[in-house]
Image (cartoon, rainbow, N blue to C red):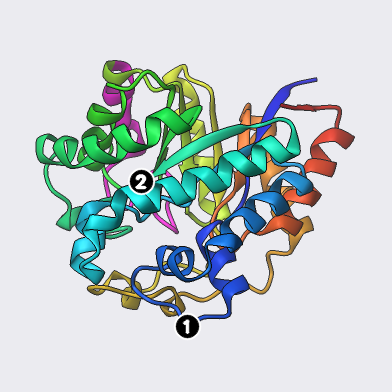
Amino acid sequence: MTKITLLDGSIGQELVKRSGDRATPLWSTSVMIDHPDLVREVHDAYFKAGATVATTNTYAVLRDRLSRLADIADKIEELTDTAATAAKSARQSHGSGRVAGSLGPLMASYRPDICPPPAEAEQRYEEPVRLLSPHVDILLIETMSSVDQSEGALRAAVKSDKPVWLAVSVDDDDGTRLRSGEPVGDLGPLVAKYNPAAVLVNCSRPEAVQAALEIIKDFGKPFGAYANGFTRISAGFLEDAPTVDALEQRSDLDPAAYAEFVMGWVDQGATIVGGCCEVGPDHISELSKRLRAYGHEVV
């Protein structure tokens, strides 16, 4: 029997779907502004499905994104508090679990080419790290697509008193490489230097995850993955100020199919698993059942 941490699934995409609103470049932040009660509803759904971690809806609550896309940078504290309160309230109602504070990429997802260098990124991340740390059990750095991008976030996050998990996104067709084209193995010295508590793969096609984990498992840290349900990251989404409707949801990744991928990662030694974009509560419910059926302890 292995102790497995079961993350939640998509937060942003789930919020967009439940709101019924048209997608905007601010993504789930727009939904949180217009429908704050939905955030708690989504966390409740994942805890009910069996997840043991609630990830705050702060992936895009970053000053550079708020100012560039909507000129609402002055709302960063308010939005962080709204997101953190929803996750903590859901955890309290559920009676157990942990809260992970999401730190997404600066500027845009999957675009390490436009992100600032590590020293500047460190300064930009200091604010969200400071705002999130009092509310969460874990700082979860998500969807880092290059070595430098990972370092910038790590430099700020490790100054907190909370465990830091680093999650990186890999090439859709070659899981041995980050989206920047750099080998996943190039993260090794960074992991050794900044000592995150876990290293994960996220927001990548599930088919690409196995190869990445074979490399990451040698870093000597707890590891795992939470993949997305997109067909692939399209060229249209890499343009300036994209919306999520530029991405296509897969039709072949139902809960049973996704669980097959995840159980393979667990066989590789993964102990932290869950879902990312387009992986919803039904997927997490199936995964929870499958893990327990195989004799694993979900913690």
Residues 208 and 17: in front is 17
Residue at the limit of the structure toward the right, as seen here: 293
Which x, y percent locates residue 141? 38, 39
Label drawn at residue 166: none
| Tag 2: amino acid | Arg
Q: Residues within 10 Å of mark 1 (few under 14, many from 20)?
A: few
In the picture, measured across the screen, residue 245 lies left or right of residue 86, that is: left
Label drawn at residue 177: 2
- Is residue 67 located in the magenta-colored stretch of the structure? no
Quadrant of the image for the N terminus?
Answer: top right
- Is residue 191 located in the magenta-colored stretch of the structure? yes
Instruction: Classify mark 1: helix, strand or loop.
Output: loop
Q: Residues within 10 Å of mark 2 (few under 14, many from 20)?
A: many
Q: Is residue 125 placed above or below 203 in the rendered structure?
A: above
**Residue to which mark 1 is pinned:** 22
Instruction: Classify mark 2: helix, strand or loop.
Output: loop
Residue at 30 percent across and 32 percent down: it is 130
Residue at 58 percent across and 39 percent down: it is 88
Which x, y percent locates residue 31? 48, 68
Residue at the limit of the structure toward the bottom, as seen here: 22
Residue 16 in view of the camera: yes
Q: Is residue 188 placed above or below 106 in the rendered structure?
A: above
Q: Is residue 269 placed above or below 226 in the rendered structure?
A: above
Residue at 57 percent across and 53 percent down: it is 206
Quadrant of the image for the C terminus?
Answer: top right
CA separation, marks 2 and 1? 33 Å
In the picture, measured across the screen, residue 100 lies left or right of residue 5, that is: left
Contact? badges 2 and 1 (CB < 8 Å): no
Eye-nearest disc, 2 or 1: 1
In the picture, measured across the screen, residue 266 lies left or right of residue 88, that is: right
Where residue 199 sits, quadrant-wise, is top left
The residue range painted magenta reads 171-192
